[in-house]
Amino acid sequence: MSSRTEPSSIPSGLPPAAGSAGERTSDRSGRELYRELFAPIPRQSAASSRPFGGTANPIGPKPPATLAESGLPTGLLNELILKLLYLQGVQTGQEISRQLRLSFGVIAAGLDALQQQRCLEVLSADMVGKMSYRFNLTELGRLRAREAFDQCRYCGPAPVTLTDFVEQCRRQTVAGFTCNPQTLRQAFENLVIAPELLAELGPAVCSGRSIFLFGPPGNGKTLIAKGLGQFLHDNGGEIHVPYAIHSEGSIITVFDPIVHRTCDDQELIQAGLLPGEPGNRPGAITQELRADPRYRRVRRPVVITGGELTLSQLELQFNKVGNFYAAPLHIKANGGVFLIDDFGRQLVSPRELLNRWIVPLEERIDYQTLITGRKFAVPFEQLTIFSTNLDPQDLVDDAFLRRIRHRIAIPAPSAETLSAIFARVCQDRGLAWRPGTIERLVSLGYYGPHRRPRASDPRDLADLLLATCHYLGESPSLESPAFDDVCQRFFQSPANMTKSVGSTA
């Protein structure tokens, strides 16, 4: 029989693969399951109140030594083996082990069962043992593989159970993150931020709960929110994210290379689990690996969404062709930061969006629904940041504000702060800073009750000045007539602009 991989067009309408569907679901009460999975973490001593430090790695999940330890149904493992061989052709036991990210001791029982069912045949073997056997599908095996593809086309690293995923998320929560005035000030050293604002941001980060940033536009709310995300990303250590999870008979992919920045590439290359340098010899998955290879070790993720956010993006994304799911954005952000920028300007109304998050923010649990209607609970373990320039009273009610632990106003900068920002902007752009510039703008009437300063004004003015002087062939200077013209255009009010257009017409 040829070992060549067949085309990937899979016929439909075949009955499900035997001996798999019934093993994947549980009749246990959902309430009982949630109570067990999300029980409070026992208090530890003050010296070890968290399972990891600010820069240390969390406890990695232990690789399973047996199929029972993995928690996966036998039918699911057999289907993954069949689909892998259908796509890849002849594979050794060691190669199957590597691609499923399970040790050979875990998959050996599945290979034996498939051989007994006459779905697999052994083409050849070395003296090393069963790991060196070269397995190939029989005709019955190909039929079973096609039936498995009809049920679910996922063919990658074996998933982890929902129970294991929940436990790992609890180990690597952002709550209790190491943050003090020195480390936070160092993280924002490239920005001009008032000390009293840093004094509010610090406890908010340490709480690991939710933050609501609000204030007039142009004063750095998005910049501050992204800075907090970068702070946790750079200083929060590493966490473990599974390729996929298995729950209620379905597979949900979690690891996303766009969202998650991996830190274990070299380790996996040396173990032969990732392609590496030419000549790299793949090895076997052993218990000596630092963590279960069905997980990837990543920096704490930062997921940013804005006006494009819809309610559907907060639910499982079902792949109709593949019959499996992708986790929504906030689940991929577990252990990191989930930033909702421009809150209130989404396609969905703020009230609908907030109602969707009332339970997750309060209970730190989110409920996801499969297309079958079955629900299951997943952790909501991230630092959630809302940023808006709209009036909070127009967006949220008291019931929601009560669930936002930290409400931080980002006001217009003072004249002193604005001068410091302008000086920093000039330094970055090679402009000579002129003390008294802000006072001059105030004296000319550009700032006042009609127009409050914005932290973004220095950047915008400097960029307009550089562009104007480049066009005119002049040297940029804050003392030049070109700067006066730039200010006049920049601070022109919409009312004046309308009058100018009307007079011209």
Image: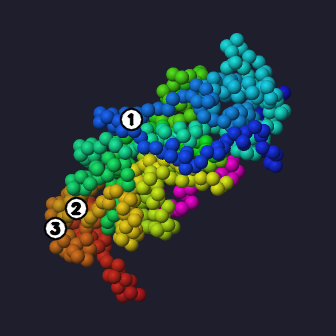
Which stretch appears magenta?
Answer: 305-323
Where, quadrant-wise, is the N terminus in this rendering?
Answer: top right
The residue at the point 28 percent across, 49 percent down is 202
2 left or right, relative to 190: right
Question: Which structural element holds mark 2?
Answer: helix
In front: label 1 or label 3:
1
Where, quadrant-wise, is the C terminus in this rendering?
Answer: bottom left
Q: Nearer the viewer, residue 330 or 192?
A: 330
| Residue on which disc 2 sits | 418
Q: Residue 372 sits in which quadrant?
A: bottom right
Question: How far apart are the two marked residues, 3 and 2, measured between alpha carbons?
Answer: 10 Å
Counting from the top left corner in percent of width and height, residue 304 is at 45, 54
N-terminal-most mark, 2 or 1 = 1
| Mark number displayed over residue 51 | 1
Q: Residues within 10 Å of mark 1 (few under 14, many from 20)?
A: some
Give the amino acid at mark 2.
Leu
| Residue on which disc 3 sits | 439
Q: Which color mode does the image show?
A: rainbow
Measured along the vertical axis of the image, is residue 357 above or below residue 115? below
N-terminal-most mark, 1 or 3 = 1
Question: Which structural element holds mark 1?
Answer: loop
Give the amino acid at mark 1.
Pro
